[in-house]
Amino acid sequence: EQQEINNLHIVIMKALGRAWSDLSDLPADWLHSPEISEPAARLRQIVKREFEHTPLWGIKDPRMCLLLPLWLELFETAKIDPAFVIIVRNPAEVAQSIARRDGIAESRGLMIWLRHVLSAERHTRGHRRLFVTYRQLLDNWRPVIDRIGKTLKITWPTSPDVASAKVTEFLEPSMRKHRIDDAAFLQNPSIPDLVHRAY
């Protein structure tokens, strides 16, 4: 969660007249909109400054799901070979979390989840990618990290054995404040069919 990058994502979304919680598509041809040329240039500068001499790095911000075309263009220009780890959380858990934090109705939260997940899936097609669940990551991170490394052909600069104590401390299962059983979720008739199918 590189803060400068996350802040620029907010600036870009605002310049396009959108927020993370909007359900409408970004404007047509938004990628070449003059309104985002300056923040997009700053984004490229930050990536160059922070990561140019780093062989392996990662960033996280849910807005990336919506802004992936900009990132893909940036990666291509900078000759960066991206790999994507798409962490999928139970949509009802996400909706409850959004409702608690932002006061947004859970029904809308489900649609926000759907928009982000479908955008991430669509724009990462043809690239190295892996889907993992939030539950897998928090409940037993080690096999997830091993699968990420193997599938995406990543050699970790610090072995999982060495990093184990710090990772375990960071990924406390208690971080997951909303727990919903998947089977119950998939049988819940109040959840839109598209959300069930996407999950």
Image: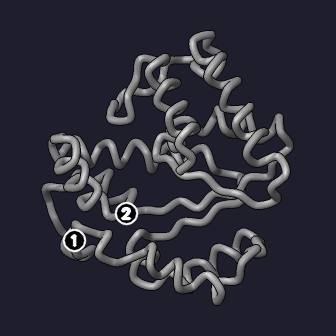
> Residue 17 at what x, y percent from top left?
41, 17
Q: In this picture, is 107 found above or below 89?
A: above
What residue is shown with label 2?
89
N-terminal of the pair, mark 2 or mark 1, is 2
> Residue 195 at what x, y percent from top left?
31, 53
Q: Residues within 10 Å of mark 2 (few under 14, many from 20)?
A: some
Query: Taking 181 as reference, is 16 left or right?
Result: right
Query: Taking 135 as reference, is 122 left or right?
Result: right
Q: In this picture, is 7 found above or below 115?
A: above
Residue drawn 15% across and 42% down?
A: 105
Q: Is mark 2 on a helix, strand or loop?
A: loop
What residue is shown with label 1?
180
Residue drawn 71% across and 57% down?
A: 57
Instruction: Identify which residue, 130 or 190, lies in the foreground.
Output: 130
Q: Which amino acid does label 1 sit on?
A: Ile
> Residue 169 at what x, y percent from top left?
44, 79
Q: What element carries label 1?
A: loop
Residue drawn 45% across and 85% down?
A: 140
The quarter of the displayed image where residue 25 is located: top left
The quarter of the displayed image where residue 97 is located: bottom left
Residue drawn 34% across and 32% down?
A: 23
